[in-house]
Structures are given as C-alpha cells and as structure tokens.
Amino acid sequence: MKSYRRFESEQELKEHIRDNFETYVHLLKEKIAPLEENYRRSYKQGVVGIFLVIASIVTWYIHPPILIPLSLLFLYFGIKMIRSALPVVYSFNKALNQASYSLVFKLFDLEAEYFEPSEEVTPKKLDYLPKRLSSIKYVFPKKFYHDTLTPTVSGKVGKLLDHSMLMTEPRNTIQVDDAFTSKFSNREMYIAELDVKHIERSRRRVFVKNIFSGLFVALELPRTLEGKTFISTELGLLFQDIGGQVFDPDAVETELEWNDFEKLLEVKTTNPIEARYILTPDFMEDLFIWWRDRKQLGDKKLQVRLSFVGNHMYVLFPDKRTRVGNAALRVQAHETQKHLESIALPLMHILNLIDDVEHRIKS
C-alpha cells in the first residue's frame, strides 16, 4: 500500500518550502500570468476607489456645505471603481488559490482537481458579514439582503458534512471557497474551505450565527465500518460550538489507554472494540503532534474533530487563516511561502492520520 507520508515534522515541511520558494513563485506566476497584469491594474483601481470613498466621508463631515456635491462625486466614483475592480481581484485570487493547492498536493505525490461548489455558495451579499467571531449572533437590518435570499446546504460538500455527523447545531448556509478532490489509493478524497452560518429572519431583521470556519476533509475508506466513532482534541468540548450532542444516541465515551494525551481527548463511539482497533498508537501519536504543534503556535483551543461513519473518515479543522472570499495582495516570495504553509501544514497532519488509518483498515 502506497504511503503519502513525506515529511516527519512541520519544521521539515517549512524548510522544504523555504528552500524551494523561488521555484514555487516562478511556477505560480506561470499559472496566473494571463491574469496578473489586469489584476494589478484593478487592484490599484480598487485602492483609488477606497481612497475616494474615504475622501468623500472626510469632506462630508469636516468641510463646509459648499463641498457636499464634491463629496457625493467622490463617493459615486469611489464605489464605481471598487465594484469594477472586485470581480477581477476575486478571479485572480481564485486562480492563485487553485494553483497553490495543486502545487501543495504535488508535494505529497497527489493530484488536486478543483471542482466548482456552485450549489454551496450563498448570494454575495453574505460576504459583508463578519466571519471570525465564532458562535456569536449578529443582527443586521433586512436591507442588507436581497428579499429573495435563500440559503442552501445542497451539493456534494453539504451532503458529506451531514453524513459526517460532526455538526449537530442548526445551520442553513455553507459558503465554500476552494474545494478540491484527489485520489488517495484510488479512492476519492474531498478537501474544502468552509464558512458555515445559520441565518434566521424576522420582518425587519436578519439574525446570523457563525458556526464554523476552516477546513473540511472527507475520505472514502477501504471498507465500511460497523460502528460510528467521534473524536475531539479538547476534553469536554466534543461538539460544543458546532453542536451540543452526537446524532447517534448509542455513542458512549471510550478509553483508549494512550498515555497522558488521552486525558485531553474525548472519544465517543457506538463500537468500542472497533474504535480501539482504528485508533492505533501511531494514529494517536500523529494526532498528539498536530495538537502540540498548534498549541505551541498559540492556538488555545484547537478543536480538531474527526469521525468515522460508514465508509468515510471525516476531519473538521477550525483555522483562523482560512480566507473564504478574501483576496491575495500579490505573488512574491514571502507571501507565497506563508500562503503555501497555511495549506501544506494542516494537509500534512491530515494525510499522516489518513496514512495510519489506511494501514489499519484493509478492504
């Protein structure tokens, strides 16, 4: 069975990217060369538009009333320039992210194929909502939305997320930024950047609750499992913030007898014998390393969630670096290195866990 374990530590992976980043910058520029000139022009146009909007506000509040027409003129042209630049910047960022993911997957001898998650993306009006303060309700006037706004959770990613049972909290909007498929031992693997919300409406207000922002991975396993197993890397936090209970009422807490790290874990399963078989010492060691590395970087609550349901393994990795809907500034060495690391590091840990499971679960 082929192994996709290419790097033994985050430091080794970072050094590899650092040693080759000039080559990576060159490869990325080749991919996006047809878009870059138009992007730079539109980016500058957007900056000028922002400046004009700011000038409009300053002119309106500080200067005499005689300058109000000038303020309105600044506002009109500023908004027009920003709206004209945004589609170009978004297209460039999308192309850059696709090229970056493809490059990172090749580090692990995998091919990434982009798929358009059109069914998961909600109307663009949602891009104006705050995304970073998880699990807090925001209230917005209804005028911020189209009257016909209908959130959706349909599509492949939404169905996989439902099947994973990793989110028990109500949600009705899944925004998917980058989504890719890859073949892992000739079986399908999905990886997607998600921004999940629950939206409710009243006559005058729209209530928005942020549920989750980060990476979601789904891998088809060699065989179908008898039980369902759920794991959280924070004791006592299983399904908190992204839900209050396990869908399957037969799931019970299970001890794995793996040193002190088990005191920090929470594991629930409907089949304790099968769970102990799947969650080997190697698997636990790799999960601990991921948890430890994130803690050292200052992540106070790295609530990595995993589940084994049916013939799939699922991973939810909350990541504040997930840039759903955001745009890159430029392609240069330092920013490229950081961007590639933000994709490669979690992927390395996920592939290490998958590798452990692959060697345990045989068809």
Image (cartoon, rainbow, N blue to C red):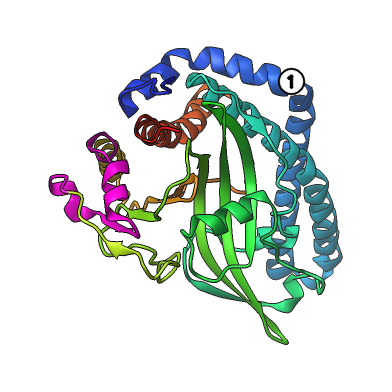
Decide: is 327 above or below 120: above
Residue 246 in the image: above or below residue 258: below
Q: Position of residue 76 (x, y in %)?
A: 85, 58
Q: Residue at x 49, y 62 (%)?
A: 167
* Residue at the spot of label 1: 33
For residue 328, say whether it is visible: no
- The extreme left residue here reads 259
Percent across and percent down for residue 33 are 74, 20
From what the image shows, is residue 198 above or below residue 356?
below
Q: Can you see residue 338?
A: yes
On the image, the x and y values in percent for residue 306 come to: 40, 50
Q: Is residue 253 left or right of residue 150?
A: left
* Residue 88 falls in image quadrant: top right
| Residue type, label 1 | Ala
The residue sitting at 62% across, 50% down in the picture is 157
- Pick whichever, 163 or 195, lies toward us: 163
Compared across the picture, whether 160 is left or right of 2 comes to right
In the picture, measured across the screen, residue 355 lies left or right of residue 198, that is: left
Give the extent of the magenta segment.
Answer: 257-284
Disc 1 secondary structure class: helix
Residue 276 drawn in magenta: yes
Residue visible at 49% across and 34% down? 343
